[in-house]
């Protein structure tokens, strides 16, 4: 078996972090129950809470949230309008989209603009999430995709007849939704706890 070459002293730290994040993407992304989300959120410092909450209530990709932080005029009432070119994903199914907010999302999203800007780079943000995971939650670590996938899973479970609207708001197809979000084993108790987060989305 070939051994990995040792890293030279000149290796760029950001490059190392990106490699770690890319390797971690091979593993399953953790989806949180509402009770786990509340535990997680309560243990965060104020700026991590602002970022993680904004990721959850919008279902944005992290790169989208970074750009939204720099463009508060994209927020218009109950919607965040992501213009063409804002998604930073070559294979994005929609080139622009409107993200619908729930009642609590509409209230909390403005907190994002109190967070430092620019937001942390993705590798550093993911590394911090992993460190926090070890301290706050048992089980698989949280990463930047956790909040987007958690949010869509909640919406699909709570509003099963709104699959198309959810997919459009999230920026992908119903086929992707069927493959990843329609068999999450939530319970009635989860539905009750989701309510304060998803109510008003439709």
Image (spheres, grey):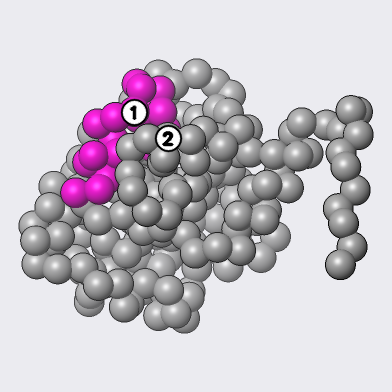
Residue 149 drawn at (x, y percent): 41, 59
Magenta span main SS = helix
Q: Which of the pair 113/126 is nearer the observer?
A: 126
Mark sitting earlier along the chain (2/1): 1
Against 118, residue 90 (above or below) is below
Q: Measuring from the top left, give residue 115's x and y in whole percent.
A: 44, 21
Query: Please, is residue 198 above or below residue 175 in the view?
Result: above
Q: What range of the chain is rendered magenta? A: 35-52
Q: Give x and y (percent) for residue 174.
A: 43, 77
Residue where numbered disc 1 is placed: 44
Asked whether 67 falls inside the magenta stretch, the response is no
Which residue shows up at 59% across the image and 50% down it? Answer: 87
Front: mark 2 or 1:
2
Question: Is mark 2 in CB contact (under 8 Å) with mark 1?
Answer: yes
Q: In this figure, what is the number of numbered marks?
A: 2
Q: CA distance from mark 2 to mark 1?
A: 8 Å
| Left or right side of 67 for 146 | left
Of the numbered discs in the image, which one, if any, rests on residue 159?
none
* Foreground of the two, 163 or 25: 25
Could you say which is closer to the camera, residue 106 or residue 3?
Answer: 3
Residue 132 disc label: 2
* Residue occupying image coordinates x 91% and y 34%: 8
């Amino acid at each position: 078996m070939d051994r990995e070459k040792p890293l030279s002293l000149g290796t760029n730290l950001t490059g190392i972090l990106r490699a770690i994040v890319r390797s971690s993407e091979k593993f399953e992304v953790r989806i949180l129950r509402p009770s786990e989300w509340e535990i997680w959120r309560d243990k965060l410092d104020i700026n991590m809470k602002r970022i993680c909450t904004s990721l959850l209530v919008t279902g944005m990709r992290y790169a989208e949230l970074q750009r939204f932080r720099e463009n508060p005029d994209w927020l218009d009432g109950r919607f965040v309008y992501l213009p063409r070119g804002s998604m930073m994903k070559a294979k994005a199914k929609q080139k622009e989209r409107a993200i619908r907010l729930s009642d609590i999302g509409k209230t909390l999203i403005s907190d994002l603009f109190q967070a430092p800007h620019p937001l942390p780079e993705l590798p550093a943000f993911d590394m911090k999430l992993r460190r926090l995971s070890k301290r706050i939650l048992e089980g698989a670590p949280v990463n930047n995709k956790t909040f987007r996938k958690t949010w869509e899973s909640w919406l699909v479970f709570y509003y099963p007849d709104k699959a198309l609207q959810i997919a459009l708001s999230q920026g992908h197809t119903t086929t992707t939704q069927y493959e990843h979000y329609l068999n999450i084993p939530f319970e009635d108790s989860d539905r009750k706890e989701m309510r304060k987060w998803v109510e008003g989305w439709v």
